[in-house]
Image: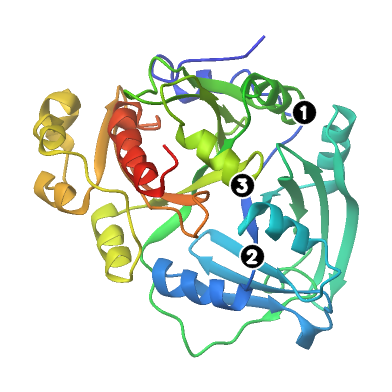
Amino acid sequence: MSKEVKSVEFGLEKIFEGAQDFLPLLGTDYIEFIVGNAKQAAHFYKTAFGFQSLAYAGLETGVRDRASYVLVQDKIRIVLTTPLTAESSLNDHIVKHGDGVKVVALWVEDARAAYQETTSRGAKSYMEPVVEQDEFGETVRAGVYTYGETVHMFVERKNYNGVFLPGFVKWESDYNPSSVGLKYVDHMVGNVGWNEMNTWVKWYEDVMGFVNFLSFDDKQINTEYSALMSKVMSNGNGRIKFPINEPAEGKKKSQVEEYLDFYNGPGVQHIAVATDDIIKTVAAMKSRGVEFLSAPPQAYYDMIPSRLGVHMDMMKEDISELQKLGIMIDADEEGYLLQIFTKPVEDRPTLFFEIIQRMGARGFGAGNFKALFESIEREQEKRGTL
């Protein structure tokens, strides 16, 4: 039975009381993308998203089959990896999925224990525990598969003080555009196939010890043409949140169906990254060429005071500024949040990013679902995939 608790009704300690403690997670360690050209992708994320050069591994460091560029912004680390040989299995990932997320790495105190706990509960092994060493110490990494070909890598680095991982060297670059104010990974959303959501909810509960603390059905997430269902999974300390989406029946093809068609299976749909000043962050990203979904209509912004209710008094942002940038706002009993979504960041309509600023709210913008999905549908219509 799903251990679901409504976050709007209980405090944080109540939300996560059902979470098991056999897999303590300290946070998101890194996110690794498999891409067709890592050098060019790194330039894009530096220029458009304000990431900084951190580390590199490739031919110059003795790695013969791949090149990896590591970028950082505050607590966010992304790794961009590309194959260097025709024989590399990474080519298959690119052909099938296009550029996309392969590894969601989780920072743990004990990678061996994390691997043992998850595989003993039914997780499929991706990589048995491996100790990696250099002059800066050692790390332990181990991995298991989650939905599709996505992997959770457990990373233990308590005995390591190098720049990233053994085998990587510091990446020196004269080109380091300034940060846009992104702070940390708030959550990551996965899309799975028809009738698979509850299967993966149970997997996260049984294998990872997560709880399902919010659920949305197709009566809540729908437009005139399409619908989807979603359940939000979280670990015990609330640092890791993985909403899981599946399609629902509608008049036309939903965004989840479009994703599954072009990604050729389940995978990470979007990465939500937090900021302390969403107006400043989004304005900077727009000036650097990042494309966002179109803004909701005037009526949406006219209704903000009534939608925020008691939280309107604490609101610091100018509604006209939010409207100019297309930023949406929603509230729950604990506060409000601001959010906006990019268009897909590659040619396949798959991966995109969410920029979010939380002002007390712990939800996911349920009040914005209709406006958001109508905006996505307008893009689908242009692509001929609605």
Q: Position of residue 281 (x, y in %)?
A: 31, 60
Residue 352: x and y in percent read 47, 51
How many numbered tags mark residues here? 3
Residue picked out by circle 1: 207
Above/below status of 247 relative to 23: above
Evaluate whether residue 240 shows in this view: no
**Which label is found at residue 263?**
3
Q: Nearer the viewer, mark 3 or mark 2?
A: 3
Can you say which quadrant of the picture contains the C terminus? top left
Q: Nearer the viewer, residue 328 or 372?
A: 372
In front: label 2 or label 1: 2
The CA span between labels 3 and 2 is 13 Å
Residue 164's quadrant in the figure? bottom right
Q: Nearer the viewer, mark 3 or mark 1?
A: 3
At x 52% / y 54%, what residue is drawn?
Answer: 348
Contact? badges 3 and 2 (CB < 8 Å): no
Which residue is painted at 38% across and 52% down in the image? 342
Question: In the visual, does 41 lie left or right of 225?
Answer: right
Q: Quadrant of residue 314?
A: top left
N-terminal-most mark, 3 or 1: 1
Q: Disc 3 residue type? A: Tyr
**Nearest the camera: 69 or 21?**
69
Q: Position of residue 256 (x, y in %)?
A: 51, 35
Q: Earlier in the sequence, mark 3 or mark 2?
A: 2
Considering only order in the chain, which callout, 1 or 2, is on the residue closer to the N terminus?
2
Instruction: Quote the CA–CA distance across marks 2 and 1.
Output: 29 Å
Q: Which residue does the image show at 67% across and 9% down from the upper left? A: 1
> What residue is shown with label 2?
35
The image quadrant that residue 136 belongs to is: bottom right
